Amino acid sequence: MSASDQENVRFSKGLEGIVAAESSVGYVDGLAGKLVYRGYDVNTLVENCDYEEVSYLLLNGELPNREQYKDYSSSLRKKRQLDNDTLNLIRDLKDTHPMSALRTVISFIGARDNRSIEPDLETQKSISIDLIAKIPSVVAAINRAHNSKEFISPDDDLPFSSNFFYQALGRRPDKDEAKMIDEALILHADHGMNASTFTSMVVISTLSDMYSAVTAAISSLKGPLHGGANERALALIQRVGKPENAEKVISNMIASKEKIMGFGHRVYKVYDPRAKILKKFVETVTKKNGQENLFLTAEKIENIMAQTLGSKGIFPNVDFYSGLLYYSVGFDPSIFTPIFAVGRISGWTARSLEYLSDNKIFRPRGMYVGNRGPKEFIPIDDRQ
């Protein structure tokens, strides 16, 4: 880019505020605190739908009728089982970080699927459905291996979210837990042009394949500023320990300008609607499982943050309560971010397919700020 060209280009670090694509999949209204999937408010969806319905909605643009739901659900159940080679790989990776294992396993599954070389839309949609079906089994198996436990086969009598819970933890969820895990996955299914979603779209725009796009998205989600924030938010709650410690700990963190994980959002300037929904389940599940002190501590931290920084638009985000929710039913913190991927897989694939349907390879410009030269060349023997 020439100097004159650069003068007419807007630069925004991190692409903040830059529109890179059009989409009808989902919408985040940061000022009103609303999250919309295909025109439906997320509150409506969590109250009336299960994850499979929402997944179908994101992929196809409309909620399924009874027959469509039955076919889609049946298709997902038929594709849940992992073969022995994949399970052996997961066993070999038991000592690696679960997100690294997830990235490697999805790439492995893709490397063995000859369809991955076909860039056409229908093939990539078929692969997407396979991935939506298999990722819960992969994450569940990673969780089992990481804790030196035997793998559990899918239970075809259980729906998507409850089966994931069962395969991961070795017990069937009760009514509250089943609703909790289902709503958590729905709330994580899509969220605008976040880093991992954008990553998947950049990859698919090259006419690569959905396995590559999702592997790249997982790599992006692994970062602590994206998917890893829920693990750190739980660590903060545990560090505070009890409600009466919150004032001192949080005040000191604010004074020292230490980042308080689970608060603030690049888009939401009001209370994250997902956090509001999850908070209700956290209160119920922590009381039931003897973790009520953690909830009361989290609530105290929230109140202090609202009083101190609420005027600046800093409120709890989805990460503040999601980690505590998973922890209270028995998930290890290291598996929190892979659970995020179990929900987000539908959003990644839906947006990638949407972009592929009217594709143009992403090729943003970079603003050069180095020496424009020409510099004098010095032979290597004469350089200081």
Image: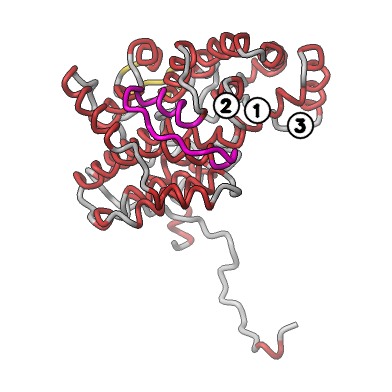
- For the record, the magenta segment spans 145-168
In the rendered image, residue 251, in percent from the top left (x then y), is placed at 80, 21
Residue type beneath disc 2 = Asp
Name which quarter of the figure residue 379 lies in. Answer: bottom right
Residue depicted at 62% across the width and 9% down the height: 287
Q: Secondary structure at mark 2?
A: helix
Q: CA distance from mark 3 to mark 1?
A: 16 Å
Badge 3 or badge 1: first in the primary sequence: 1
> What residue is shown at x 65% (from left), y 15% (from top)?
311
Image quadrant where residue 66 sits:
top left
Judging by the rendered image, the residue that carries numbered circle 1 is 233
Mark 1 or mark 2, which is nearer the start of the sequence?
1
Mark number, residue 257:
3
* Residue 58 against residue 4 in the figure, above or below: above
Q: Which mark is residue 319?
A: 2
Residue 214 x, y percent position in the rendering: 39, 45
How many neighbours does mark 1 have within 10 angstroms: few (below 14), some (14-19), or many (20 or more)? many
* Left or right of residue 122: residue 235: right
* SS at badge 1: helix
Q: State the SS at label 3.
A: loop
Give the residue furthest to the front.
150
Q: Label 1 sits on what residue type? A: Ala
**Image quadrant for the C terminus?**
bottom right
Is 277 situated left or right of 51 in this image? right
Are circles 2 and 1 on residues that touch, CB within 8 Å?
yes
User: N-terminal of the two: label 3 or label 2?
Assistant: 3
Q: Amino acid at mark 3?
A: Lys
**Label 2, label 1: how many angstroms apart (C-alpha)?**
7 Å
Is residue 113 in the magenta section? no
